[in-house]
Image: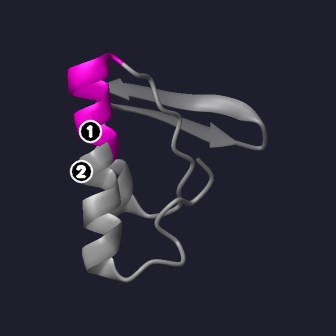
Amino acid sequence: ADEPTGALDSKTGVELMDLFGKLHRERGLTLCVVTHDPEVAARTPRIVRLQDGRVTGDETE
């Protein structure tokens, strides 16, 4: 999902990220969320940082 919370108000953005987390926990789904928002990124179990098309970091909870 490319910037899935970008056009949403903050309450709806939190609800969407909660839904993504629930799908991951309950159904084992893997979701790739692309964001520039550090608050959205902080809600994920893994962050892969890209710069100029290259991986510059990989952080796991």
Give the structural element (helix, strand or loop) at label 1: helix
View extreme (right): residue: 52
Query: Would residue 61 be visible to someone looking at this image?
Result: no
Q: Provide residue 18's location: percent of width, then percent of height.
A: 24, 50
Mark 1 in CB contact with mark 2 (< 8 angstroms): yes
Can you identify the residue that label 1 sits on? 21
Q: Provide residue 33's location: percent of width, then percent of height.
A: 51, 44
Can you identify the residue that label 2 sits on? 18
Magenta region includes residue 23 = yes
Q: Tag 1: residue type?
A: Gly
View extreme (bottom): residue: 9
Residue sitting at 31 percent across and 32 percent down?
A: 23
| Between 2 and 27, the one nearer to me in the picture | 27
| Between 57 and 17, the one nearer to me in the picture | 17
Magenta region includes residue 4 = no
Query: Would residue 20 be visible to someone looking at this image?
Result: yes
Compared to residue 40, the image places residue 11 above or below, namely below
Residue sitting at 34 percent across and 42 percent down?
A: 20
Q: Which residues are magenta?
A: 20-28
Q: Residues within 10 Å of mark 1 (few under 14, many from 20)?
A: some
Compared to residue 29, the image places residue 54 above or below, namely below
Q: Provide residue 28's location: percent of width, then percent of height.
A: 32, 16
Q: Main secondary structure of the magenta part?
A: helix
User: Residue 30's quadrant in the figure?
Assistant: top left
User: Residue 27's quadrant in the figure?
Assistant: top left
Give the structural element (helix, strand or loop) at label 2: helix
Q: Quadrant of the C terminus?
A: top left
Residue sitting at 35 percent across and 68 percent down?
A: 13
Q: Specify whether 35 is left or right of 51.
A: left
Q: Tag 2: residue type?
A: Asp
Q: Provide residue 54's location: percent of width, then percent of height.
A: 72, 31
